[in-house]
Image (cartoon, rainbow, N blue to C red):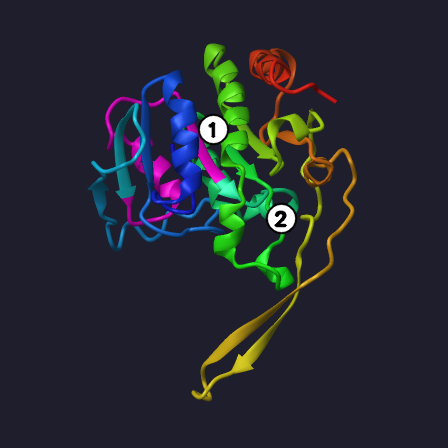
Amino acid sequence: MTNDDGIDAPGIHHLAAAIAPLGDVYVIAPDGEYSGASVAIGPIWIEHPTVTRRRDFPVDGVVEAWTISGPPALSTFYARLGAFGEPFDLVVSGINPGANVGRSVYHSGTIGACLSARNGGWSGVAVSQSVAGMAIEGQRTWTDVLGSQKWHVAAEVASHYVGGLVANMPSEPVVVNLNVPNTELDEIEGWAIGEVGRLPPRAMSSVALVPTEDPDRFGLDIQWGDLIDLPDHTDGGLIEHDRVSVTYLSRLDGEHRDDMAKAEAALDGLITRR
């Protein structure tokens, strides 16, 4: 397990607790914030990152926990090269606060860890959850937003899907982008397989330089556009309508498509497919 928000982020704690009963879970996550890192691993041939054992990881059932002073894809990269023992079967990344849909998929460090896994022949499941009342609306701080996340719902959805996946691991590596609405479980309107949309629900509209006391140094004024009503068949459109979005970021056809049947059936046991 890994994430792009750091090993002390609440999302990974909730996810680890939900996933721990499914197998031998190792947490290998960044020591800080690496959102937007995508599949970056950093200049490891110039400066080797440090790795620290975290004996204080606050989740029972985790075999070991480690932090790496680098992005999440680097955690997967080192794991693939044997730094943490025998090869793993699956990488689970998240829970990210904020849906990773539309073009944000290409920038997400949460997803980047799973793409790095596929490079080495492992499957990966990236788990994200939508947020409401973002600080960009001037209504709430990011701390308030995190406090209102229904982590337990995203964790339960993820544990069902991952449980079905590990019961019938695909014959070829697959990358799954799982996005969960920030609602109670009984308020979720269903789930569907979504396409990667062209846009996220809300995107940056402009960035302007802001002068500081240093004439050569500038801050940034970031403006956000309005919320966009996205097509129902896209990942972002599903989330906007309180449905779980399952997006396969790797080609699935024939028998490989059938490999996902148990994972999808596990979701059907929790949420009605619509």
Q: Which residue is mark 2?
A: 132
Considering depth in this image, is 35 or 226 the residue closer to the camera?
A: 226
Q: Position of residue 210 (x, y in %)?
A: 55, 80
Type of amino acid under label 1: Gly
Q: In the image, what residue occupies the spot 58% across and 29% down?
A: 250
Q: Which residue is mark 1?
A: 124
- What element does badge 2 sit on? loop
User: Magenta residues, as a range?
Assistant: 68-95
Does 35 lie within the magenta span?
no
Is residue 103 toward the left or the right of residue 45 in the image? right
Q: Is residue 269 above or below residue 248?
A: above
Considering depth in this image, is 270 or 211 the residue closer to the camera?
A: 270
The quarter of the image holding the N terminus is: top left
Image quadrant in which you'd find residue 63: top left
Image quadrant in which you'd find residue 16: top left
Q: In the image, what residue occupies the spot 42% across and 51% down?
A: 34
